[in-house]
Image: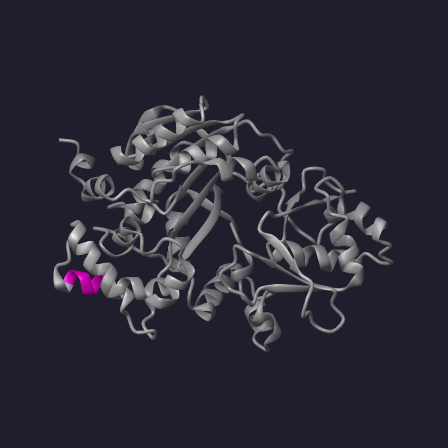
Amino acid sequence: MDPASTDPIRAFYNAHPYPPPVPDLDRVRERWRDPGRSRSEFHLFWPDRPFRAEFDILVAGCGTSQAARHAICWPGSRVTGIDVSATSLEETRRLKQRYALDNLETEMRAIEDVGQSGRQFDLIVCTGVLHHLADPGLGLRALRSVLKPGGALYLMVYAPHGRTGIYLLQAYCRQLGIGTSAEEIDGLVEVVEALPWQHPLMAVLGQSRDFLDRDALADALLNPRDRAYSVPQLFELIAASGLAFRRWYRQAPYLPHCGAMARTSHAARVRALPPQAQFAAMELWRGAMATHSVVLGRDDEEAGHPVDFQGEDWMGYVPIRLPATACEREQVPPGAVGVLFNRSHRFHDIVLPVGPEEARMLEAIDGQRTIGEIASMAGSPAPAGPRAFFEALWRHDQVAIDASKGAA
């Protein structure tokens, strides 16, 4: 008998598909009509390569809609979605038919068996899945085996500290023997709604749009298996799987250069640590990271051209605004004309005030001009100003960098 067929995870997601099925992808399709969105996403994965919109994508553990979303966002690419849940794959096929997604294929396949497909991929997306496997290391090594040379793997796993409230309620449910019937889940919703405001789960409820959806609640509190990774544990898993860290998908929360930490006397001490130790310290300081999202590559190849504002090439970089960025122009600090923030950041201290000269450079960003061209247009008198500003934009997740053109 196939061990995957008896895995409780398969039965669980057949009964409780997650994310909750969506009726349509109209809003997703409309947002991705903006070519800047696909260019910024591409250069988060490959800052050193010229943009292209045609490649092979694997969505590993695609759930109800993730593979269809990638197919509609990247119409020139070939997308494969795999999952062990027949219910989830059926929802994906419904979206495929509705939107005529001829570039999408689906397979009933466990991540551990992905090598049996005989294919390799430029981009592998595995978010919210690996931590549910019986052996996450085995699953990650399997994904590594189908990653093309020069490919990128976008991985999201649970983080322990921000899930404290979830793990307390999981233990509560186990102690009471709470099952997954509709009646028991309804009772669990009632209990969660009655939680005291001091409970650590309340912070999660404030951040989630669908937590009290029945299937979402079951996924969080009644899942038969999950584990979380601290920053050091995550880096151990990555190294043991033949992969190498490239960047955090959203990096500002992990950097002592950003947010409230940057204004403390400890900022310099944290910056003096090696990078992985910096990330680990910031996880402990922030205390509420519920997930970690990383971009990985194979460990048998160079990382490509890194984004480096200390070298010779930065004036030739092309900055591209990230879609989630925004600017607040009211109630700004003295001397500032606006405050930049990223709507996808959970931590609201991560903001970047901009002065008049910086605002002129910001307005000149069009996704085509180099930093050197932007600085010249804005009349910046010396390189130090543009260098510091664009490095800050990059660190604060305001821009992706196209470094494919080299030095100006």
Left or right: 96 with respect to 7?
A: right
Q: Is residue 331 above or below residue 362?
A: below
Left or right: 24 with respect to 107?
A: right
Q: Which residues are magenta?
A: 170-174
Q: Position of residue 119 (x, y in %)?
A: 40, 25
**The C terminus is located in which quarter?**
top right
Q: How many marks?
A: 0
* Colouring style: one colour
- State the residue at coordinates (52%, 61%): 253
- The secondary structure that most of the magenta stretch takes on is helix
Q: Position of residue 134 (x, y in %)?
A: 24, 46
Question: Does residue 122 appear anywhere in the picture?
Answer: no
Q: Position of residue 240 (x, y in %)?
A: 37, 47
Q: Position of residue 123 (x, y in %)?
A: 48, 35
- State the residue at coordinates (65%, 63%): 352
Left or right: 88 with respect to 329?
A: left
Left or right: 172 with respect to 93?
A: left
Question: Does residue 83 appear anywhere in the picture?
Answer: yes
Q: Nearer the viewer, residue 280 or 97?
A: 97
- Name the quadrant containing residue 331: bottom right
- State the residue at coordinates (28%, 70%): 195
- State the residue at coordinates (57%, 73%): 269
Q: Within the magenta stretch, is there residue 228?
A: no
**The N terminus is located in which quarter?**
top left
The residue positioned farthest toward the top in the image shown: 102
